[in-house]
Image (cartoon, rainbow, N blue to C red):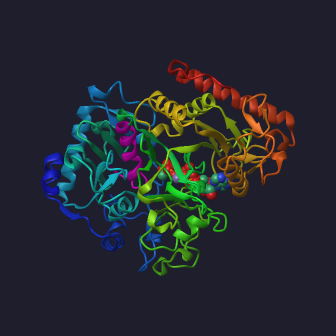
Amino acid sequence: MSFQADLEKLLGLSSVNYKYELSKTELFKEAVANDRGRVRRDGPSDEQKAYPTVLGVNGPLVFYTDPDCTGRRTKDTYAVKWPEVADEIWFKADLNPYDPEKFAGLLKRVIAHLNAKNATLYVKDVYMGSDPDFAVPYRFVGEYATHAMFVHNMFPKNLPGVKDVDARRWTMLNAPSFVCEPERDGCRAEAAVVIDTRNRICLVAGRADYCGVNKKTIFTVGNYLLPKDGRLSMHCSANVGKNNDAAILFGLSGTGKTTLSADASRRLIGDDETIWSDNGLCNLEDGCYAKLINLDKEAEPVIAQALSKPGTIIENVPPLPGKKMEECHPDVLDLFDDSIAENTRFSYPLEANPNVMPNGRGPHPQTIVLLTADAFGVLPPISILEPKDVMYHFVSGFTARVAGTEVGVTEPTPTFSACFGGPFMAQKPNVYAKLLADKMEHHKARCILLNTGWSGGSYGVGKRMSLKITRALLNAALNGELDNVETEVHPILKLKMPKSCPGVDSSILNPRNTWANKDAYDATAIKLRDMFRDNFEKKGFAAFGIEPRI
Ligand SMILES: Nc1ncnc2c1ncn2[C@@H]1O[C@H](COP(=O)(O)OP(=O)(O)O)[C@@H](O)[C@H]1O
Ligand SMILES: C=C(OP(=O)(O)O)C(=O)O
Ligand SMILES: [Mn+2]
């Protein structure tokens, strides 16, 4: 069936103007010409007037999202509560149930809106995953050329050998010009992101134009589908060392998956979503989506070098004072300016990194890394985990971020997000935990908990661990240099801390040593321990057969 006939049948799109499979150059031109304010309800905002979406000939496409939408709208993310998935899907505050009738009404209204305005829609056919055994056909249909270019950058294309493409395809409809009406549409706000498992549709209705929505939504679908066939889908990055030794790095946003997996001495599999199946590891993507804020070009050379490559997309980074975006070259951007967003981003195709694994695949991992960025500053910089500890920390999914960037805010915000990616885990955490336990048992990987957060005190007193130290700790673990090292057990947090590590001052390995005020350290560690215990109780993890470890 032609894609038009397919979209008419699936969605009822009948009087729209498709731009199908435009090249990146064409999408680039369309984005520059049209994306700025074109489909916004009330025209470009002041920010967008100041920073039009533009670019030079070979530089990046610089895109500014709606100022209120510089990240994912987790509270506005839903899955339709069809009876057949009502018990299976893990509905929660960041994946809410959507009433099936209300969803049918909303979808109809979005389609009527697009038909009425004779919308131009960009269509891209890609795959989630580069292993034809399980790759999920993903059709993007949306109003922004920028989003189509993002999808082109980020996902595998032209994958031979995928079976039943038409029957298995998922379609995203992304319509930022629509405005949801909560009362009528049954949602919370003027925008909603909804997954419909029965019809294999992802709907982005309204202003949710952060590029990341176009990947995280379909990953949530992947996390729903792939475990059904025994494939473990994971919110983790992955890379491979010189001895064909693979590592996976789990972590919530901001903990270092992208940064630490981009290592010139290791080949990258992927920076965000990885499948662990009987075939080994496989990336779901074909690109990276790195944070740009305060990028230290010396400490992060792999990401920095990709900045000068053609065909990349930069999101929400303002130009340096006095620079015009028309000169657009990465050097006119102020990577330290967080006035639009802390979450400034950079999407680049994997081909912009010279050191990647072919076809996004690699062997079974020898090392499992759980990343956390503990802004309380009490977790050890590195801990060696037994399999039972891994399961405990995997379901706990702890990180603590700084509360905000306002002056005077010093209290870290704890987050417990199961499987280090709660919002994207469409099935219940025990499904992923069981698969991880089985695979770990079978492949005997070593495991560490790496704290990329604060040392020498909580946020406001201590400092974030330097990338140099974090990388030295990580490399020592990856090289097996911590396999037989002497350890001590943290008396409160029950974590096994190495007493020495090559290239790292041993005095920092026990975090208590780095705090001037030992009583404050002990009190904060106890507070964090109690948070772990409360979370474990509240979520009922014991019922999954997970042992409490703290
Ligand atoms: N010690 C550290 N380890 C990892 N990242 C660090 C460290 N110190 C600062 N950072 C910064 O923290 C951020 C980590 O974000 P990122 O790698 O994008 O995480 P994720 O991909 O898990 O969301 C980056 O901006 C990085 O520069
Ligand atoms: C793109 C995202 O992932 P991460 O921050 O984990 O890189 C996101 O959370 O929106
Ligand atoms: Mn990332």
Q: Is residue 294 or residue 224 the one in the foreground? A: 224
510 drawn magenta: no
Confirm whether the magenta stretch covers residue 213.
Answer: yes
Q: Nearer the viewer, residue 49 or 333?
A: 333
127 sits to left or right of 289 = left
104 up-or-down from 147: above or below = above
Q: Residue at x 53, y 37 (%)?
A: 443
Q: Which residues are magenta?
A: 205-226
Residue sticking out furthest to the front? 243
Quadrant location, the C terminus = top right
Residue drawn 58% across the image and 70% down it: 334
Q: How many marks?
A: 0
Image quarter for ligand 1 equals bottom right
User: Residue 326, percent across and down?
Assistant: 45, 80
Q: Quadrant of residue 495?
A: top right
- Which of 367/29 is in front? 367
> For residue 425, which quarter of the picture?
top left
User: Does the image show residue 188?
Assistant: no
